[in-house]
Amino acid sequence: EVVAAEAAPLDGQAVRLAVHHFGNPAEAESLAARLAAALPACPPAQISSLPAVLAAHAGLGVLAVIVGKRPGPAGPAGLST
């Protein structure tokens, strides 16, 4: 519900999701599957492990979801819009 609420203001724009974890890849996969079911128009979430330095602050078993706009086409300087 929280992720859907965060993605709502970006309605009409391409959205990208990421699920970060530390020490619990199965839970990250499960969360990504639930996100895919809740947001069928969104591409599957990228899953990655957090670096130990961040996990040291967040704790073992942490899950984080990132919601952001997908980059647009490259402009003349090679930067996405």
Image (tube, grey):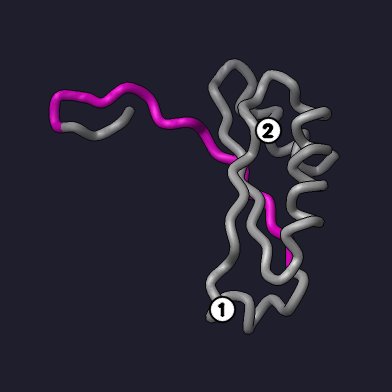
Q: Which image quadrant is residue 15 in?
A: top right
Q: Nearer the viewer, mark 2 or mark 1?
A: 1
At mark 2, the secondary structure is helix
**Outermost residue toward the top in this view:** 12
Ranked by sequence position, the earlier of labels 2 and 1 is 2
Q: Which residue is drawn at 69% across and 76% down?
A: 58
Which residue occupies the foreground of this view, 76 or 63? Answer: 63
The disc labelled 2 sits on which kind of residue?
Ala
Magenta segment boundaries in residue numbering: 62-77
How many labels were placed on the picture? 2
At mark 1, the secondary structure is helix
Q: Which residue is drawn at 68% across and 33% down?
A: 7
Please tell me how crowded label 2 is: few (under 14), some (14-19), or many (20+) other residues with Cα within 10 Å. Answer: many
Report x, y in % for residue 14. 54, 23
Q: Which residue is drawn at 14% across and 31% down?
A: 77
Please tell me how crowded label 1 is: few (under 14), some (14-19), or many (20+) other residues with Cα within 10 Å. Answer: few
Q: Which image quarter holds the N terminus?
A: top right
Q: Name the residue under label 1.
A: 52
The reply, left or right, for residue 42 in relation to residue 37 is: left
Q: Which image quadrant is residue 63 in?
A: bottom right
Q: Tell me whether the residue at label 2 lies in contact with that at label 1, contact meaning CB atoms closer than 8 angstroms.
A: no
Q: Which image quarter holds the C terminus?
A: top left
The disc labelled 1 sits on which kind of residue?
Ala
Residue 69 counted in the magenta span = yes
Report x, y in % for residue 23. 71, 71
Which residue occupies the foreground of this view, 26 or 61? Answer: 26
Q: Mark 2 points at which residue?
A: 7
